Image: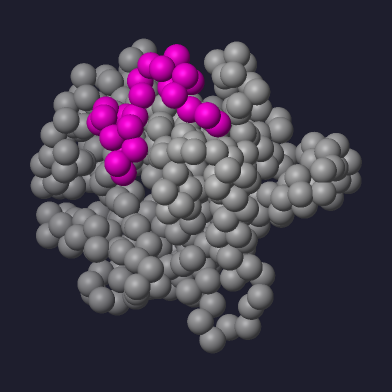
Amino acid sequence: MKIAIAGTGYVGLSNAVLLSQNNNVYAVDILPEKVNMINNKISPIVDCDIEEYLKNKKLNLKATLDAEEAYTDAEFVVVSTPTNYDPELNYFDTTSVETVCKLVIKYNPDAVIIIKSTVPVGYTDQLREKLGFENILFSPEFLREGRALFDNLYPSRIIVGAPNDVRLKKKAEQFAALLREGAVKETIPVVYTGLAEAEAIKLFSNTYLALRISFFNELDTYAELRGLNSKDIIDGVGLDPRIGNHYNNPSFGYGGYCLPKDTKQLMANYNNVPQNLIGAVVDANTTRKDFIASQILKIAGFGKKKNPVVGIYRLTMKSGSDNFRESSVQGVMKRIKAKGVEIVIYEPTYNEERFFNSKVYKDLYEFKMKADVIVANRYNSELDDVLNKVYTRDLYFRD
């Protein structure tokens, strides 16, 4: 079967690799360098499984800049383009999704479009009506940056939203079967819902994860200010099987590409709907970053020591990732810089000499010597020799 994928970020490329094991897949991007890398079996993103599959697996995958080539005769077109949140409009910027859909209709009006980009609740129905095109389904993605292909090979669930139409429900079942066929995990729950329900599942899932992060971060804030052992408290709380010892490692706040924007979009979707908790999840992230920044300034001797230097160990959001979009440490950095404190950064994956006017070091030793306090959202053993000046809330040494 011919399948086209629009966008080669974490969602698009992981799905392209997954589906190209058993199908003829065209991956469309607008950046020539990414297309060339994929066609040369090199992953443009850091993901160990994608790198391994591109290099060693037999895949029927072609990356292209030519949308017409990709979409023509494709049975399914998967849309996985970015939908960044616009704070002024309180809405995802869905321009790229609509642009792809219009091209698909132009080149191949028989194709079934599967939107995997995260969108507001109700968007897919509105788009179908706006474009006068029925063949649009929505299938949310649940993956981690740096582990995108793994999470598609071993998915927690597959969800496909379709309108109340016999033909399109069969297409939804067919697409779910393609995802299951490419997966390694044998028993995968599959849920078929309406379009808006599938959109809501994505936003509520990510907001719950943000809520859980915020809860353990606020527990950690309490423990740190009261001089208590945060890890002991979390371990004891987590022994309740209804709570569990998972996704409980404190951090500088939730970040990354999905959680900040998805929580804000869900809160916007609550317009004229009573709520307290959703807004609190969004506000809690700001409060946590304020607290972390104040602790770092205190440790650095701000106001007492002349010209303290704060070192930021890694901009990346997660271990094993090269993505630092919306990483929580950036929010902390902004608060520290606002006080006039010098910041230096160690980030070996960043190719520029400065990041928002802060010097970027590639040499870890030089970075360690320059910084008076080293801030690490996630700890690494290469900081062991300067442990006395490291500030982290990473209690479990994992994401």
- Residue 230 spot, x, y in % from top left: 79, 41
91 or 56: which is nearer to us? 91
The reply to whether residue 284 is in sight is yes
The residue at the point 53 percent across, 71 percent down is: 267
Q: Is residue 238 left or right of residue 286?
A: right
As displayed, is residue 273 above or below residue 157?
below
The residue at the point 49 percent across, 75 percent down is: 269
Magenta-colored stretch includes residue 360: yes
Q: Is residue 165 left or right of residue 300?
A: left
As displayed, is residue 90 above or below residue 37?
below
- Residue 135 spot, x, y in % from top left: 31, 63
Q: How is the image coloured?
A: one colour
Where does the C terminus fall, quadrant-wise?
top right
As displayed, is residue 181 above or below residue 42?
below
The residue at the point 31 percent across, 25 percent down is: 43
The residue at the point 56 percent across, 64 percent down is: 282
Q: Is residue 269 left or right of residue 219?
A: left
Where does the N terminus fall, quadrant-wise?
top left
Q: Which residues are magenta?
A: 350-373
Magenta-colored stretch includes residue 108: no
260 or 116: which is nearer to us? 260
The reply to whether residue 198 is in sight is no
- Residue 6 spot, x, y in % from top left: 26, 46
Number of numbered discs visible in the structure rendering: 0
- Residue 163 spot, x, y in % from top left: 43, 69
